[in-house]
Amino acid sequence: MSTHTTSANTKQKPTFTEIGKADHPRETKGGEQCQLYIFAVCSLLVNFILLDESLTGGPILSTANGIWSDLPPHPNYPNLLESVYKAQFHLADFVNKADEVTREVNEWVGKETEGLVNNILPHGVVNKYTRLILANALYFNGVWENKFNASLTTERDFYLLNGETIKAEFMTSKDDQRISEYDGFKVLRLEYRNGNDWDRFFSMNKYLPNAVDGLSGLVNKISSDPEFPERHKARSPVRVDCLLIPKFNISFGFEASEILKDTGLVFPPPEPRFFHKSFIEVNEEGTEAAGATVAVDDYEDDGPPPRPKKIVNFVADHPFIFFIKEEVSGVVLFMGIVLNPIIF
């Protein structure tokens, strides 16, 4: 497997593409090779794809995993978790100190998300029957490659799904943009400042239905086809007469257990409970986002293109879908739907 380095990080870094060319578990015999494949992909994800890039001028990015168990681990297990998965092991007393464990998990999540996600576990979820808690936290703070001029931000109408209209602040720009038109919707890609790591670059992709009430149809297309975002990208830059993007701030939390079961995910009894919270703010400077999930278990770039001739407008004055992703690997960090940009 070939490797290379960057000035900011002297680790040898296999690319996501190289990992993908390795033997796929469906093409190998025995569970051991399948486990090795998963091991390699997970290690690459947490140690390279989600590696912080802020020292070279790129996005601030951090990911952390935590495990709380009432069983003492094998002596080598904590070191393996830390080195491969960036996971921290915590020995917990669920029987006698359930409230303390709840507070510890919530404080850990708050710390790892820079204070944007708090109190993810409600009181009473952890109890004497709890045997294992798995937590994951992700933080992202990226500056636009081409910032929006705040003096050009104006208040305009945003059309809600119920037919009502609200006033929201819209950012604008006359710069060329990566926009592609598809049947019934458009896709806009806004790139974040990259730094010196050319193995990765991050962007926000906005999927905007042409019709004001076209969100449900677009959601159905995306949710029914895992490859939909990869096959419907914003590709070549185009000239823009009218670009309007609402500023928004979203904070949302829910118990995801029933939703996961509805997707067909099956767990042996007793079924674990999943709690998720996320936060995202988009403005003229860039994006700050954080998300955390806790499971409680009871017993391409080829250089600058020529000036484009095609003119495409992108007016996001009605509900749309967004993805924050790493473009080379296709890894999605955050996704969501903006129904109302002024409610959070």
Image: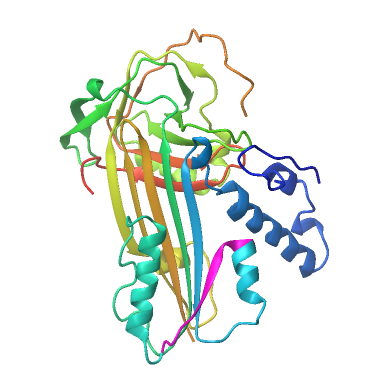
> Is residue 307 found left or right of 96 in the rendered image?
right
Residues rendered magenta in the picture: 84-94
Please report the residue visible at 72 percent of the width from the left and 47 percent of the height from the top.
12
* Looking at the image, residue 153 lies above or below residue 18: above
Q: List x then y, in percent, for residue 75.
A: 65, 81
Q: Residue at x 34, y 71 (%)?
A: 121
Q: At 60% across and 36% down in the image, what residue appears?
A: 197
Task: Decide if residue 20 is on the left or right side of residue 65.
Answer: right
Percent from the top left, x then y, of residue 240?
39, 15
Residue 132 shown left or right of residue 29 in the figure: left
Q: Nearer the viewer, residue 283 or 34?
A: 283
Q: Nearer the viewer, residue 49 or 210?
A: 49
Residue drawn at (45%, 55%) of the image: 138
Residue 186 in the image: above or below residue 104: above
Q: Is residue 332 visible?
A: yes
Q: In the image, is 296 to the left or to the right of 338?
A: right
In the rendered image, the vertical position of residue 157 relative to residue 255, given as above or below: above
Q: Is residue 221 visible?
A: no
| Residue 188 placement (x, y as % from top left) | 44, 28
Picture coordinates of residue 62 (x, y %)? Answer: 48, 52
